[in-house]
Image (cartoon, helix red, strand yellow):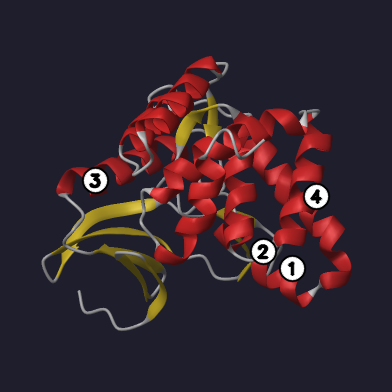
């Protein structure tokens, strides 16, 4: 397989287009277990009736592990929002409606979100007292089993020319509390410099799901701590501030 057409690049991964397929190629830092686990989780989500690219195979490209899926032709919701600022309220409604539909699904073999957060907290560079407070907060949260995308942002939704949508990038999917998934979306919008969009999202999500903002905010230090493990330098100051439970109130 000779790949030339890079359509997206992120930390440790490149996505290529190969005809009607998309090929996500992982750097050598990703183990076989990590790649197979991502493919397995995506396969599990495929079975529960969500519009998403289907997996065709897990293979190797130039010695690197790769996942081959459908290529979805269209524009991301992020692009559509940029091109249609006058329709932002309508588009935000669609965005949140898609998230609510995902959260309505169940996939009992997915990783438990609370367990994942506990592991992430233990891997941070936060001091022991802050880690203890975060672990305690996670334990206090109600245990839910909703499918949580884990990186639900407008750039991960593609609308085809006929108006159908597909949700992509299921690398972080878990089962757990929908408020945690909302907190993660809010955080990623903030990190992307979309503060106004983040506030509009939070207002819309809480109104549509009848969720108190305070509940989503309780998850903010937890998801910030989790994100900090990625070690992206330009994010660290904000994440460390948010991860401090005493400061983020």
Residue beneath the point at 54% across and 48% down: 241
Alpha-carbon span between mark 1 and mark 2 = 6 Å
Query: Is 156 placed left or right of 46 in the picture?
Result: right
Q: Mark 4 or 2 closer to N-term?
A: 2
Residue 192: x and y, percent?
59, 64
Residue beneath the point at 74% across and 43% down: 97
Q: Mark 4 or 3 closer to N-term?
A: 3
Which residue corresponds to mark 2? 77
Q: Are marks 1 and 2 in contact (CB under 8 Å)?
A: yes
Please, which residue is most extreme toward the bottom here? 4
Which residue corresponds to mark 4? 93
Q: How many numbered discs sit on the rendered protein? A: 4
Residue 156: x and y, percent?
55, 58
Residue beneath the point at 20% across and 74% down: 1
Which residue corresponds to mark 1? 81
Which residue corresponds to mark 3? 34
- The reply to whether residue 107 is visible in this rendering is no
Within-10-Å neighbours for mark 2: few <14, some 14–19, many 20+: many
Vertical order, 84 against 32 (above or below): below
- Which element is circle 3 on? helix
- Which element is circle 4 on? helix
């Amino acid at each position: 397989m000779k790949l030339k057409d890079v359509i997206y690049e992120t930390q440790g991964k490149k996505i290529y287009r190969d005809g009607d397929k998309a090929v996500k190629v992982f750097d050598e830092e990703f183990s076989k277990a990590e790649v197979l686990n991502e493919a397995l989780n995506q396969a599990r989500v495929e079975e529960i009736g969500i519009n998403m690219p289907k997996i065709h195979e897990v293979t190797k490209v130039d010695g690197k592990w790769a996942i081959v899926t459908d290529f979805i032709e269209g524009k991301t919701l992020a692009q559509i929002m940029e091109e249609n600022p006058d329709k932002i309220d309508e588009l935000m409604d669609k965005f949140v409606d898609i998230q609510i539909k995902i959260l309505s699904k169940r996939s009992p073999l997915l990783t438990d979100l609370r367990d994942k957060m506990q592991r992430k907290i233990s891997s941070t560079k936060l001091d022991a007292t802050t880690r203890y407070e975060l672990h305690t907060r996670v334990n206090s949260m109600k245990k839910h089993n909703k499918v949580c995308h884990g990186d639900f942002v407008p750039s991960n939704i593609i609308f085809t020319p006929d108006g159908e949508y597909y949700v992509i990038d299921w690398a972080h999917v878990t089962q757990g509390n929908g408020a945690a998934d909302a907190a993660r979306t809010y955080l990623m919008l903030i990190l992307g410099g979309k503060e106004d969009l983040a506030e509009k999202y939070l207002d819309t999500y809480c109104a549509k799901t009848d969720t108190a903002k305070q509940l989503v905010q309780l998850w903010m230090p937890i998801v910030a701590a989790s994100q900090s493990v990625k070690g992206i330098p330009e994010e660290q100051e904000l994440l460390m501030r948010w991860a401090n439970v005493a400061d983020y109130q």
